[in-house]
Image (cartoon, rainbow, N blue to C red):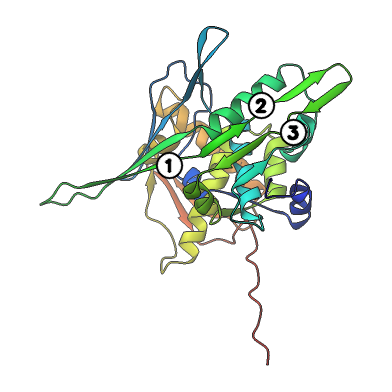
Amino acid sequence: MPSIHQTQWQQLKGQKRVYIMPDFCQFSLPYRTPQSSEPWIRYNGRRTFQLTPLQHMAKGELVTLWPSGKYARLMLIWISTQVTRAQDSNNHTIPLPQSLRQLMRDLHISRDPRGTDYRLFREQLQAISSLHINITDDLSTDTEEMYETQTITMATKTKIGWTYSPGDEGHINGYITLTDETWDKMKKSVPLDDEVLEVLVQAYRGHGQLIDIYMWLSLRIYGLNHSSRMQTSVITWKQLEAQFGGSFHERKEFTRSFKSALEKVAAIWPGLHYEIIDKEGIVLKRSRQSVTPKRKPSNTQ
């Protein structure tokens, strides 16, 4: 029996909060579908993220499915939000919406589904729920080499798809059953402003880099505000390219694109403070968080 009521997303939109699993704030998925099945590798400081895609036979051919583009990111936010708001933590199964049209509305995609969307959204959900991520931390010192690796498997079982015929869209009772580890990580997700996300999707067509930068800033500003520092050290373009630049051919191209995306995010995030240092990188400064922190209930006698 599914554990999360299917109308919760609509209730969330009234609360203006959605959520994302913290690991996906630290590196980028592909912006475009990779042309090979080789692992996707990104770096964040001394941490390495290695992703492997889903492969399966379909009509006699080997199919490789990568999570990529804006839809993969929006679906990860959708799944993380369902988990964060779940009342029952014993059943880790998330039911899919009754129709693809409903899912697209939940993701702020206002148009009706096209014929090709059924395959696209099914494949992206398959790719996300079948992800395997190896996260390796370099803990080496001057006198010792040491590495620590954890493996994240997103789901234990899935059933994904919608049937469609002209004038009639059907549901196959699809679901995603997450692993215990993924469920626990998503329970500690980073809050995002649903209105900001809606603007990024509708006004700017939701390019994956815009969503990445917004998620990354949400995590970094929260951490900075809860530290003793007033600003970060310079985050170099080389570091940012290693983290987010897998789909760009040259650093100049990445830097130009990142600056433009950052400006768009800042335009709809009042109170975001940062400084761009030419030829070096950027400095983040203490800022108002994108999502207003919830007030803790006062202890009254």
Is disc 2 surrounded by few (<14), some (14 to 19) or many (20+) residues within 10 Å?
many
- The residue at 50%/46% (across/down) is 25
Quick one: 170 or 273, which is closer to the camera?
A: 170
Element type at mark 3? helix
Quick one: 217 or 170, which is closer to the camera?
A: 170
Rendering coords of residue 41 (x, y %): 38, 31
Q: Quadrant of the N terminus?
A: top right
Quick one: 95 or 83, which is closer to the camera?
A: 95
Element type at mark 2? helix
Q: Nearer the viewer, mark 3 or mark 1?
A: 1
Q: Which mark is residue 103?
A: none
Rendering coords of residue 26 (x, y %): 45, 45
Q: CA distance from mark 3 to mark 2?
A: 9 Å
- Residue that numbered label 3 is attached to: 104
Residue farthest to the right, as pictured: 167
Is disc 1 surrounded by few (<14), some (14 to 19) or many (20+) residues within 10 Å?
some
Q: Is 87 rendered above or below residue 200?
A: below
Q: Quadrant of the C terminus?
A: bottom right
- The residue at 49%/64% (across/down) is 225
Q: Is 141 rendered above or below residue 58?
A: below
- Residue that numbered label 1 is attached to: 152
Residue farthest to the left, as pictured: 143
User: Residues at badges 3 and 2 in contact (C-beta under 8 Å)?
Assistant: yes
Residue farthest to the front, as pictured: 1
- Residue that numbered label 2 is attached to: 121
Q: Amino acid at mark 1?
A: Ile
Would residue 137 appear left or right of 143 to someone viewing this image? right
- The residue at 59%/33% (across/down) is 158
Residue 272 in sight from this viewpoint: yes
Q: Amino acid at mark 3?
A: Met
Rendering coords of residue 228 (x, y %): 41, 69
